[in-house]
Every structure is written in structure tokens, then in C-alpha cells.
């Protein structure tokens, strides 16, 4: 039965249709894998009973000729999406016992198309991080290991690390993520899977625990571009419950993937050649450029001159919005409450106990940059630079259809590495943050292995609302790279 966990979503849908296996069998095969891979700590909450009930209902729908686009496909859901009746923690002590009475729009759409939920995956606390080490429920272990040093546990990336690790270890067929500054693309690169963040406004944010509302965007992890297109199509669409959701038709992406890149113009931004970029990342990028050239694309050099300000801009705007969003956790309305001597004392004790170190750091930075006297110097300035970053992209897209860059400046690092210095950790986001600030669609596609045998991704960034081109370029890279490597040691605990 473990062979079922090797299928792509597209293959599984065909198998279900042909009655080669049932949704219950497909789901059970993944539940068995989840049990064997508990040491990866990818899930905070497993929902096997719910999954089997949903799978049985799916089999019935298929028998009745009423199967939806994802009917019977077992997915993992990042524990930032509110799921009705299923605990939703945001990987925080603050929400450790929070069970929503409502369903997020994205998960509602996936379930309406017949998807099955295996459980809720771990993340960095409130999605703040790049390594999954800030989770209250312990770090997630990447199923991949270094050839030279297989005993060392590596991070899966973050913040959607549990979703990426679960998929790479074949505990699910696809998973949801959210991406505020790279939280889908960077873990996809670290775990050797495809991760897509659509244009801001494409997927509803309703029912997703907020981090930085002007940046947060839902997206999907899958093992192939085709599977990503299937999942994204199901999850996308206008939602009147989210005022930043866009009234845009959702194209039929899965049928548009094979157009190739002949004659398309692919921009290579020179500013992404950052100081100290490891040689293997530059080599991978060059290989990607060569692949697209061979496939008939025209490569153009472009400039995004404000790139160097993207990280500091992001690390002002994201904490500012976080400090405001997280004000709601006061021990009165949601989650944890630690009783104090009076109301103020209750607030303080609750927030001191409920939030982890990184979340507190962000709340402090955010409160500082929003405070009277500093607001103009930091927050307003950052907003102005954000506009310049967007204009850089708009100018670049006058010369090209999409951009190609590395996804992250390194492969997966060891758990504990980069912990001594928050700035070092923030550098992980150097290639992903600019597209987030500009609200543009981006994906990471596995493109090769590092010298140490770890997956590396290439990032494709597109024009607003042009996920179609992003997916098509991703498909061309996928074909050229034919990345078939799988983590070898995913079921063994390090010695
Ligand atoms: N790593 C980035 C941060 O820590 C991005 C996180 C995200 O996209 N949610 O903020």
C-alpha cells in the first residue's frame, strides 16, 4: 500500500476514477506513513478519524457520479488555517487550546472539491520564522539529510515547515501554506517540493490567523507543477468575507501548463547576485537560465535597484502589522488567560506566558516603529520604499514576462544553526521578500541537489495575476531538471 503514497495527485485522481483503489485506501496509506514518521514532528494535530470519514464520503460521491476536482485526495493543512471543530494553534502556547467554530475559506474550498484532511501541520509560531524552530510544539525535522553528515537533523525551512516536510516524506499528497515573506517558497526549496504563492488577493485570507495582513497570502505545496495548479485552482477565488480578496476569474491553470516558454522573455535581476552567495546557488541559477534558453526563451538582464532595501523594509512593515494584529490576544477573547491582580496585570501575564521569544521580539519592533516620533522615520519610510520596490518590478516587467532567481541563499541548515543572531535568520528571506512586498505571484520548483545531496529550488516571479506564466515557466524548469530524488532516510531517526 505504500506505493499509493508515491503517486502524484493527478495520478491518484486517475486511479480513483478507474477504481484501482478507493479514497479510504489512499487515505489509510498516508495515515500509516504519518504514524511511521512521527519523529519528524510535522503534525501538531493528526485527524485520522476525520480523514477516514471524509474519505468514505468521497468514495460514496464518486460511486454516485458526483466527485469533485480533488475528491479523495489526502492533504495536510498548515495549523494557521482555522478548521471548524479541529484545534488550530498557530504553533503558539497562546492558542494551544483554541478550537475554531468556523472554517477558513481556503480549506472550505478544498473540502468542497472533495479533499480529505489528514491533520494540521507545524509552523513557526504565528508564521514568524524561516526554520520552524520557533514553534511552541518543538521543531520539525526535514526528512532530507546531508550526505556527509546524515546524523545531523536539518530544518525544513519556515514558516510552513511542517507542510513541506510532510509532503517530502510522503505523509500527504499536497498541503496548504501561507507566505508572508517566503514561508511557502523557502521551505519548498529546503524540502525538494513545489511551492506556489499566488498574487496577493487571489486566495482569501478569511479564517487564516493573521500575521501581517498586507503581506499574508495562502498558497499550496505539491510534488509537481501540475498538482500545484490543481490545488491552487481549487483554493482560489473571490471571497466577500475578505475585503482584500480580488474579483478575478480563476483560470483553468491545470490545462495551460504545456505551452512551453518559446519566445517568452525571462528576466534575470542582477541585484539578486548578493554578496557571499554560495557558488552552488549561482551555479544552479545559471543552469536554470541555460535550461530556459534551450527551451526557446529569451533571457534579458533586468535591474531591481531597490532590492537591497527589501529586507529592512519587510522587517519594519511585517512586525508593525503583527504588533497590531496580535493585540487581540489579551486573555479575554481568545486562547490562553493567565489571571492577574487586575485587568492590566492579566493582559501582561497572559501575553508574557503565551508568546514565544521571536513573537515578542516582533511585537516590540512593531510597536517601536509605529510609536509617535518614530512612525515617520521608520514605518512611513518603509511604506515609501515598498512602493519603489513595486515600481522596480513594474519596470522590469516592461522588458520580460517573468523573472528567474534562486529561492533561498542556501540549502537546509542544521537545527540550531543561525539561532544566535536573528539578522542571520532574516537573511534567508533575501530572495523571497521583494515579491511579497510587491504582492506578486512566485513559486519555487526543485531544480537540483546541493553538493551535500540536499534539494535546491529556483524561484519564478510573475506579473500580478499572471500565475499562468509562473506555472508555465515552472513547468519548463521541472521538465529540464527532472528532479526525482527523494529523501532516503525519512523513516529513520538520526543515531
Ligand atoms: N521568514 C519570514 C519571517 O520570518 C517570512 C515568514 C512568512 O512568510 N510567514 O517573517
Image (spheres, rainbow, N blue to C red):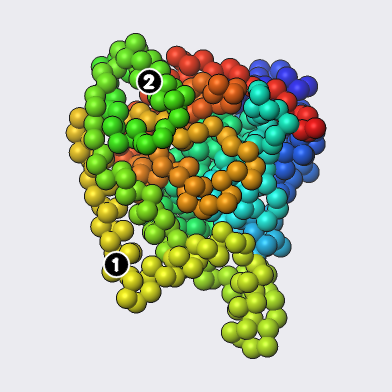
Along the line of sight, which residue is nearer the eye, 232 or 312? 312
Q: Residue at x 38, y 70 (%)?
A: 370
Labelled pair 1, 2 in contact (Cβ < 8 Å): no
Tell me the crowding category of disc 2: few under 14, some 14 to 19, or many 20 or more residues within 10 angstroms, Cα based: some
Indicate the quadrant where residue 296 lies: top left
* Residue 56 in view in this figure: no
Mark 2: which secondary structure?
A: helix
* Residue 146 in view in this figure: yes
Indicate the quadrant where residue 452 lies: top right
Q: Earlier in the sequence, mark 1 or mark 2?
A: 2
Q: Is residue 177 above or below residue 268?
A: below
Q: Kindly identify which residue carries mark 2.
A: 286
Q: Residue at x 59, y 32 (%)?
A: 191
Q: Residue at x 24, y 35 (%)?
A: 303
Indicate the quadrant where residue 340 lies: bottom right
Mark 1: which secondary structure?
A: helix
Tell me the crowding category of disc 1: few under 14, some 14 to 19, or many 20 or more residues within 10 angstroms, Cα based: few
Q: Is residue 134 above or below residue 144?
A: below
Along the line of sight, which residue is nearer the eye, 303 or 336? 303
Along the line of sight, which residue is nearer the eye, 264 or 201? 264
Q: Residue at x 40, y 45 (%)?
A: 433
Q: Kindly identify which residue carries mark 1.
A: 377
Q: From the viewer's perspective, is 205 left or right of 140?
A: left
x and y percentages locating residue 162 in the rendered image: 64, 42
x and y percentages locating residue 58 in the rendered image: 68, 35
Q: How many angstroms separate mark 1 from mark 2 (CA)?
A: 39 Å
x and y percentages locating residue 240 in the rendered image: 42, 56
x and y percentages locating residue 495 in the rendered image: 80, 32
How many marks the image carries: the answer is 2
Amino acid at each position: 500500500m505504500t506505493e499509493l503514497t508515491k503517486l502524484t495527485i493527478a495520478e491518484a485522481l486517475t486511479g480513483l476514477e478507474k477504481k484501482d483503489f478507493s479514497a479510504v485506501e489512499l487515505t489509510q496509506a498516508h495515515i500509516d506513513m504519518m504514524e511511521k514518521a512521527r519523529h519528524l514532528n510535522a503534525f501538531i494535530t493528526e485527524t485520522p478519524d476525520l480523514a477516514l470519514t471524509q474519505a468514505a464520503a468521497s468514495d460514496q460521491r464518486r460511486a454516485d457520479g458526483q466527485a469533485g476536482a480533488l475528491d479523495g485526495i489526502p492533504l495536510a493543512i498548515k495549523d494557521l488555517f482555522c478548521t471548524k471543530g479541529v484545534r488550530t494553534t498557530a504553533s503558539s502556547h497562546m492558542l494551544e487550546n483554541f478550537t475554531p467554530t468556523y472554517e477558513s475559506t481556503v480549506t472550505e474550498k478544498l473540502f468542497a472539491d472533495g479533499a480529505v484532511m489528514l491533520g494540521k501541520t507545524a509552523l513557526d509560531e504565528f508564521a514568524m520564522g524561516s526554520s520552524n524552530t520557533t514553534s511552541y510544539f518543538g521543531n520539525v525535522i526535514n526528512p532530507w539529510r546531508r550526505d556527509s553528515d546524515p546524523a545531523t537533523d536539518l530544518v525544513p525551512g519556515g514558516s510552513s515547515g511542517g507542510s513541506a516536510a510532510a509532503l517530502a516524506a510522503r505523509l500527504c499528497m499536497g498541503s496548504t501554506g501561507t507566505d508572508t515573506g517566503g514561508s511557502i517558497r523557502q521551505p519548498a526549496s529546503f524540502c525538494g517540493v513545489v511551492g506556489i504563492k499566488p498574487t496577493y488577493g487571489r486566495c482569501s485570507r478569511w479564517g487564516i490567523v493573521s500575521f501581517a495582513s498586507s503581506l499574508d497570502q495562502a498558497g499550496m505545496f505539491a510534488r509537481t507543477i501540475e498538482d500545484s495548479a490543481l490545488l491552487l485552482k481549487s483554493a482560489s477565488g473571490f471571497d466577500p468575507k475578505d475585503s482584500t480578496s480580488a474579483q478575478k476569474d480563476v483560470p483553468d491553470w491545470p490545462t495551460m501548463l504545456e505551452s512551453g516558454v518559446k519566445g517568452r522573455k525571462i528576466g534575470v535581476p542582477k541585484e539578486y547576485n548578493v554578496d557571499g552567495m554560495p557558488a552552488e546557488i549561482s551555479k544552479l541559477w545559471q543552469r536554470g537560465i541555460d535550461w530556459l534558453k534551450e527551451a526557446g526563451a529569451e533571457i534579458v538582464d533586468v535591474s531591481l535597484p531597490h532590492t537591497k532595501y527589501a529586507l529592512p523594509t519587510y522587517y519594519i512593515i511585517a512586525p508593525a502589522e503583527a504588533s497590531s494584529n496580535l493585540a487581540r490576544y489579551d486573555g479575554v477573547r481568545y486562547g490562553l488567560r493567565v489571571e492577574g491582580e487586575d485587568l492590566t496585570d492579566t493582559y501582561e501575564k497572559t501575553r508574557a506566558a503565551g508568546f514565544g521569544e521571536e513573537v515578542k521580539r516582533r511585537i516590540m519592533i512593531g510597536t517601536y516603529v509605529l510609536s509617535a516620533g518614530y512612525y515617520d522615520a521608520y514605518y512611513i519610510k518603509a511604506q515609501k520604499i515598498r512602493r519603489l520596490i513595486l515600481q522596480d518590478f513594474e519596470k522590469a516587467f516592461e522588458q520580460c514576462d517573468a523573472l528567474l532567481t534562486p529561492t533561498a541563499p542556501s540549502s537546509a541548515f542544521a537545527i540550531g544553526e543561525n539561532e544566535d543572531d536573528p539578522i542571520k535568520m532574516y537573511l534567508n528571506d533575501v530572495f523571497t521578500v521583494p515579491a511579497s512586498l510587491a504582492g506578486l505571484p512566485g513559486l519555487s520548483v526543485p531544480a537540483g541537489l546541493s553538493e551535500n545531496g540536499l534539494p535546491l529550488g529556483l524561484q519564478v516571479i510573475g506579473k500580478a495575476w499572471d500565475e499562468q506564466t509562473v506555472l508555465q515557466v515552472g513547468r519548463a524548469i521541472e521538465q529540464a531538471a527532472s528532479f526525482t530524488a527523494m529523501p532516503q532516510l525519512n523513516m529513520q531517526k538520526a543515531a
